[in-house]
Image (cartoon, rainbow, N blue to C red):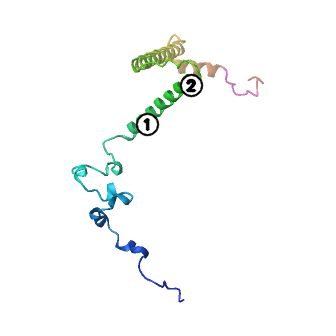
Amino acid sequence: MDGEPIRGGTRGGAGDFSWNAVKEDKHREYYLGHSVKAAAGRWQKNKDIHWYTRDNDDADEEEIQRRKKEEIRKIKEAEEDALSVALGYAPKPRPSEEEKIAAKAQKNAEKRVRKEERARVREEREQRRRGSHKDGDRDSHRDSHRDSHRHKPYDRDSRKY
């Protein structure tokens, strides 16, 4: 009537609830979460029953992501194979881990060879560009060439440039 609650406290005894009381109750199996919150018995002794909530500081984030991607890839391959068999097709042959590693090593070797070839061609091009003048002094040659094309001051008396 004055905007205040009629009864104080919580309804149904929720304020008096404790997991320790549930642990001692003979009907504890009726409570959701009783095996974790009110673990009783020898099975839980010296066991980490909260393992799923612990942070795994040992694992690297990148490693976790890599494992997840690998697991998802394997699941997708298995589903694809099952679908192929269900449709009457032969499953797609997949390379083994050793074959994948060998293919990756070969691809990396080819990449390294291409990179070395590009560096060699680049160096040859640079050598040709540098070696086009006999004296090797490209700047002085450029300056003298530029000077030969410059206009000379106008001479009024001779009317020549």
Nearer the viewer's eye, disc 1 or disc 2? 2
Q: Quadrant of the C terminus?
A: top right
The residue furthest right is: 159
Residue 5, position in %: x, y?
48, 83
Amino acid residing under circle 2: Ala
Residue 135, position in %: x, y?
50, 12
Callout 2: helix, strand or loop?
Answer: helix
Question: Majority secondary structure of the magenta segment?
Answer: loop
The earlier-in-sequence mark between 1 and 2 is: 1
- The foreground one among 84 and 123 is 84
The residue shown at (32%, 55%) is: 36
Residue, disc 2 = 86
Please give the range of residues in magenta. 149-156
Residue, disc 1 = 68
Q: Is residue 97 shown left or right of residue 142?
A: left
Q: Is residue 46 shown left or right of residue 1?
A: left
Amino acid residing under circle 1: Lys
- Classify 20 as above or below 49: below
Is 150 magenta? The answer is yes
